[in-house]
Amino acid sequence: MTDISPARIMEVGMAFWPAKVLLSAVKPGVFTTLGGDAKTGAELTDAIGLHKRANPDFFDTLVALRFLERDGDGPDSRYRNTAETALFLDKSSPAMSLNMLVEFGDAFDFSGADFDGWCRDAGFKRTEIIHLAGPASAGVAYK
């Protein structure tokens, strides 16, 4: 008899969590705020207006997902962009000239207005919201 496990179901059912963490970092501008600098969790929390309870768990989650790097341990540790996030998620980067697709639905805190504003700030010239099945939509931005 084969072993039956809920592992695959749980993997698919929880797959949105890393995406939610990433989008929650993009929305207040974590990667743009860091730019080419490194900041402590307290400095970053203050700069983007997060509740102080987000530090260090939120930033350490971004480290675990390899979206940020951390130098040191404890309250004096400093967070910085990875090469990938500096290039593609910092709004001041010239590489933001790629077309981007961000999917959002009820599980995400994005609205069409949030998406349009973020894309305008990043220099995109045209946006389009495509309604998918149910409450889900896709936002597409063009440079």
Image (cartoon, rainbow, N blue to C red):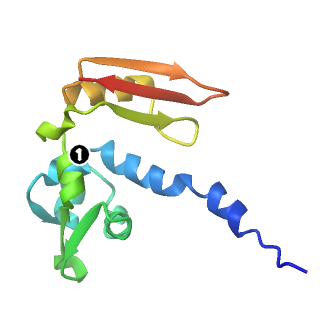
| Residue at the left extreme, as displayed | 37
**Is any atom of residue 92 visible in this view?**
no
* Quadrant where the N terminus is found in the figure: bottom right
Residue at figure coordinates x 46%, y 20% from the top left: 129
7 versus 93 height, above or below: below
1 versus 97 height, above or below: below
Quarter of the image where one finds residue 15: bottom right
Q: Position of residue 3 (x, y in %)?
A: 82, 79
| Residue at the right extreme, as displayed | 1
Quarter of the image where one finds residue 42: bottom left
Quarter of the image where one finds residue 2: bottom right
Using a 10 Å C-alpha cutoff, classify the residue at mark 1 as few (fewer than 14 neighbours), some (14 to 19) or many (20 or more): some
* Residue type (three-letter) at the residue carrying disc 1: Phe
Q: Position of residue 19 (x, y in %)?
A: 46, 51
Residue at figure coordinates x 55%, y 35% from the top left: 105
122 versus 24 height, above or below: above
Residue at figure coordinates x 33%, y 50% from the top left: 25
How many marks can you see?
A: 1
Secondary element at image label 1: helix
Residue at figure coordinates x 20%, y 32% from the top left: 97
Q: Position of residue 80 (x, y in %)?
A: 17, 63
Pick the front one: 41 or 62? 62
* Quadrant where the C terminus is found in the figure: top left
**Is any atom of residue 76 visible in this view?**
yes
Please give the residue where the numbered disc 1 appears in the rendered image.
88
Q: Is residue 79 left or right of residue 3?
A: left
Q: Position of residue 4 (x, y in %)?
A: 82, 73
| Residue at the front extreme, as displayed | 1
Q: Is residue 46 left or right of residue 65?
A: left
